[in-house]
Amino acid sequence: SLTLAGPLLVNDNQVAKFTGSTGGDVRITRTADGAATQNLGTIGFGNEDIDTELVRIQGLQDGATDAGALVFFTEAAGGVLTERARIASGGMVTLAAGLTATAILGTGLTITGSSAPDGASRIVLQQQSASASRILAYGADALTNGVLNIATIRSGGTNLITGLTINADGSVTLPIGLTVSAGGATITGNSTI
């Protein structure tokens, strides 16, 4: 083992290698208990002559001294290091602009919009039971059901066409002017079925 009181400097064009008969092992740890949100360690990437840290991977205690999160930072041209993605201790992945996704093996995926109350803009793809799956669209608040649109769009982001809408009351609307609900079907406009 190697213990250093200061930084380890690897000279120009050299490679630091860690090997062992059962595999190389590099560990970054803190030496004090600290608070529940302390930095555990950081790996930084940069250019010594321009900006010494352009990308960062950071380990943090995640709300408790026995929980950990992994945070990824990048820096845009002319900008500063900014958090772009976070893997929380419970497995939730948060991406830039507040978009979050949680994937739990065997149960589903949750995608959430930016920090809106009551899970607004949240879509959940999940296993409902052993023989059924479901897609849930959450409403704008705790009293409103969501609306789910199934649409197509060009790769450039133009020509959005909604093919099917599941309304907050559970009825289904098709672009031909047909709405199907528990009470039957309603046709509006000059629709042909």
Image (spheres, rainbow, N blue to C red):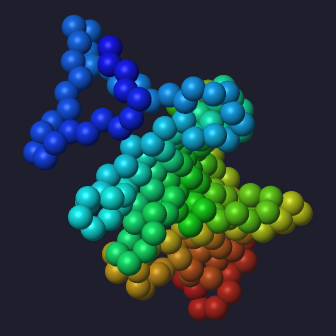
88 sits left or right of 56 in the view: right
Q: Nearer the viewer, residue 154 or 18?
A: 18
77 sits left or right of 95 in the view: left
- How many labels, in total? 0
The correct choice, above or below, for 119 with respect to 185 in the image is: above
Task: Give coordinates of residue 144: x percent, y percent.
Answer: 84, 66
Figure quadrant of residue 126: top right
Task: Give coordinates of residue 93: x percent, y percent.
Answer: 55, 47
Q: Nearer the viewer, residue 53 or 170?
A: 53
- Residue 154 visible in rendering: no
Quadrant of the image for the N terminus?
A: top left
Task: Give coordinates of residue 51: x percent, y percent.
Answer: 32, 65
Q: Nearer the viewer, residue 144 or 73?
A: 73
Figure quadrant of residue 170: bottom right
Residue at x 20%, y 32% (from the top left corner): 16
Residue at x 56%, y 52% (from the top left corner): 94
107 sits left or right of 76 in the view: right
Residue found at the very far top of the displayed protein: 21
Figure quadrant of residue 18: top left
Residue at x 72%, y 77% (from the top left corner): 186
Residue at x 34%, y 80% (from the top left corner): 156
Residue found at the very far front of the displayed protein: 5
